[in-house]
Amino acid sequence: MISISSAIPTDAAIISNTTECLPGYHGVNCDLPCPSNCGGDGSCKKYSGYCWSRCKIGHTGLKCNGTCPPNCGGDGSCRRTDDTCRYGCKTGYIGMKCEDTCSPNCGGDGSCSRIGFCRHGCRAGYTGFTCKDPCPPKCGGDGSCHIATKWCLQGCKLPGMTGFICEHTCQLGYTGPGCNITCPVNCGGDGGCSRDYGHCLDGCRPGYTGTTCRGTCSPNCGGDGSCDQSVPVCKHGCKEGFPGLHRAGLNFCL
């Protein structure tokens, strides 16, 4: 004889004959607990035990038994199918799984986009969208430069330097390591001289000679009184009435 109680099916048995089990259970008889990290109402697929919804925050996988990468941003969640972070990365990290680091030269809080572009510019002295390139070495102030053009933002390091990247070592007419020494006053042409030695670059003014134009030509040189910069021979012969010494076509006026 069959008892009445044994003839009445349990809830689990009823569910087992339908598509799925009650939330939190799975298995042919719906008597196995779902993985503990299933999200939502905790339900999982009847036969596979795979979680129906997303995983609890920080977990991943079809059964939510794995953990998300440690540097995922936001709430730390990631996609179950490929473990990629849902809400970007923690500050200082990049990549779909936030496994790489931003350039140490990123400015501000050091954060960057997932492809490595620094969000808040670069630390002083670095440039480029990933801040891996150094600024021109002659930039002044804190050494900072424009992130795209590399133009110095705070002038040049030494007095007299000019140009967008301080590529011109001294202003015209100046010399010396700090570009603060004037070129010799008798330099010819535009008055320019070399930075290292102060040698006149365009010869000398008429009447002067030598690499720095501090020597004088013979007072008896003809024409405008000029003579060669390296050898003090008169360029235009001698003044009328003054003898000249001619050697190898050169005029030395006595």
Image (tube, grey):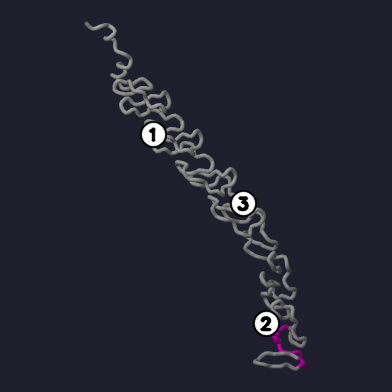
How far separated are the C-alphas under marks 3 and 2? 47 Å
Above or below, comparing residue 212 to residue 34 in the picture: below
- Label 3 sits on a secondary structure element that is loop
Q: Which quadrant is home to the C terminus?
A: bottom right
How far separated are the C-alphas under marks 1 and 3? 43 Å
Quadrant of res 26: top left
Mark 1 crowdedness (10 Å alpha carbons): few <14, some 14-19, many ≥20 = many
Which comes before the other along the chain, label 2 or label 1? 1
Dot 1 and dot 3 residues touching (CB under 8 Å): no
| Main SS of residues in magenta | loop
Q: Kindly identify which residue carries mark 3.
A: 124
Give the residues in magenta: 226-242
Q: Kindly identify which residue carries mark 2.
A: 230
Residue at position x 71%, y 76% from top? 212
Instruction: Tell me the amino acid under the disc marked 3.
Output: Ala
Which comes before the other along the chain, label 1 or label 3? 1
Identify the residue at the far left of this view.
Answer: 1
Residue at position x 65%, y 65% from top? 169
Instruction: Tell me the amino acid under the disc marked 1.
Output: Gly
> In the rendering, at what x and y percent does residue 108 appear?
60, 44
Q: Kindly identify which residue carries mark 1.
A: 61
> In the rendering, at what x and y percent does residue 87 appear?
49, 36
- Label 1 sits on a secondary structure element that is loop
